[in-house]
Structure formats: structure tokens, C-alpha cells
Amino acid sequence: MIRVLLVDDHALFRQGLRSLLESEGMRVIGEAANGREAIRYAAETHPDVILMDIQMPELDGVKATQSILEIDPKSRVIMITMYRQDRYVFEAVKAGARGYVLKDADAATLIDAIRRVAAGEALLDADMAQNVLDDFRDKREELPSEKHADLNERETMILKLLAQGFSNQDIALRLDISEKTVRNRLSEIFTKLQLNNRTQAALYAIREGIANLD
């Protein structure tokens, strides 16, 4: 059963999400009305997935996401936004959010996104990946470069599959290795490339031509 934390300042919207998720066999373990509550609930409950609104009082979703990921880099956050090109979404993804879902998405899209992220995937489409990479360049921020020569063939393949959206379980099945081995190799890859999370790793792989999203 996937355990979900809902973060949105509109109680009616949270109630609708709760009803939908529980009808799909998921468990809503908490609701937060602002970013500060989200940080506290996330630290206390360790949800499998956090649905995070962007615009909220007291502390917005981007800053809350950054704080949650600083506390626990393995947290899986999906941003909820009204607009596909929201600048705040870029900042959240750069911080380590697994992607975003539009507020006007249908129920099937949302449920699929939660299940994919719970399985370890990132919701990175080609446009989002390119926009975030452009944003790094515009602000003169750099992902590590020219380091993938340090990766061996197996590590490069794991990084490629990660960037293409495969979960740890899927990578293990494709490469005929255990999930534990995949987790260990990913930790080593992050260390070698000086990356902090799967989203940064996926962006790095796309930028360096190790993988593409076509």
C-alpha cells in the first residue's frame, strides 16, 4: 500500500484527493495546509510519496521541498501546479522533486504518476529536462561535467536506464542483478559524479548524451 502525504492549502482539494487515492487502495497518512506543516509531517511519517502544492501560505512548496530533501534526500516529492511552465516547478525539480502533475490532470494520470514515483521513477519529460538544463546554464550553475569517463560500462548503463525513467526494480531485471546491487551502484555513481539525487542524475545523463528521452 502506497503511503501518501497531501500538501495543499485548500481543504476541499485535499478531501477530493484523499477520496480518490483511498478509492485506488492508497493510504493518506497526513494532510498539511502549508509548507511548514509539510516539513514536520514528512519528518514524522516518512511517506512513500508527497503531493506538494506550489503556492501556499507561510512557506511555499518549493522551499518546503528543499527542506524536506535536505532532511531526507530519498523523499519522493511530486509537485502539483496549475501551469506546465511554472518557474517554481523548475526550482523544485532542481532541488530533487521527482517531477510534477498539473492540477487539471485526470485521475488516471495522477494515480499513474504516484505509482511510478513510488516505484522509484522520475516524471521527467523531454521539455522539462531541457528547461531545467537551460535554467542551470542561465544562472551559471553547473552540474558536474566530463566525469562520466570515470564510470564503468555497468554504471553507465544503470545511469542511462535511470534517466529513461526505469525504477530500481526494472533496472535490476534488465541487467539481471539484485535491487540491492542497483541501489549500491547508484550510490557510487552519485558519489563519483558529485550528484545529490536521481533527478540530478537523470539531467546529467541527458545533458552528457548518455541517455535521451525521445
Image (cartoon, grey):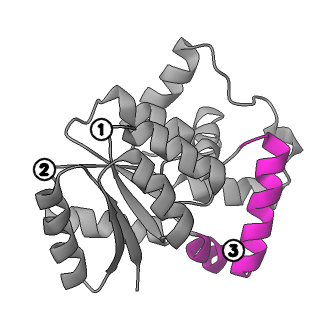
Please give the name of the residue rendered at 40% of the width and 86% of the height, measured from the top-left corner: 1
Please give the name of the residue rendered at 42% of the width and 45% of the height, measured from the top-left corner: 214
Where is residue 144 drawn, in percent x and y? 75, 31
Q: CA distance from mark 3 to mark 2?
A: 37 Å
Dot 3 corresponds to which residue? 175
Dot 1 corresponds to which residue? 57
Please give the name of the residue rendered at 29% of the width and 40% of the height, measured from the top-left corner: 56
Q: Is residue 95 left or right of residue 86?
A: right
- Are there few (<14), some (14-19), or many (20+) residues within 10 Å of tag 1? few
Which residues make up the magenta segment? 168-195
Where is residue 89 drawn, in percent x and y? 38, 36
Pick whichever of labels 3 and 1 is earlier in the sequence.
1
Pick whichever of labels 3 and 2 is earlier in the sequence.
2
| Labelled disc at residue 104 | 2
- Asked if one can make out residue 155 in the rendered structure from this viewpoint, the answer is yes
Q: Is residue 102 left or right of residue 88?
A: left
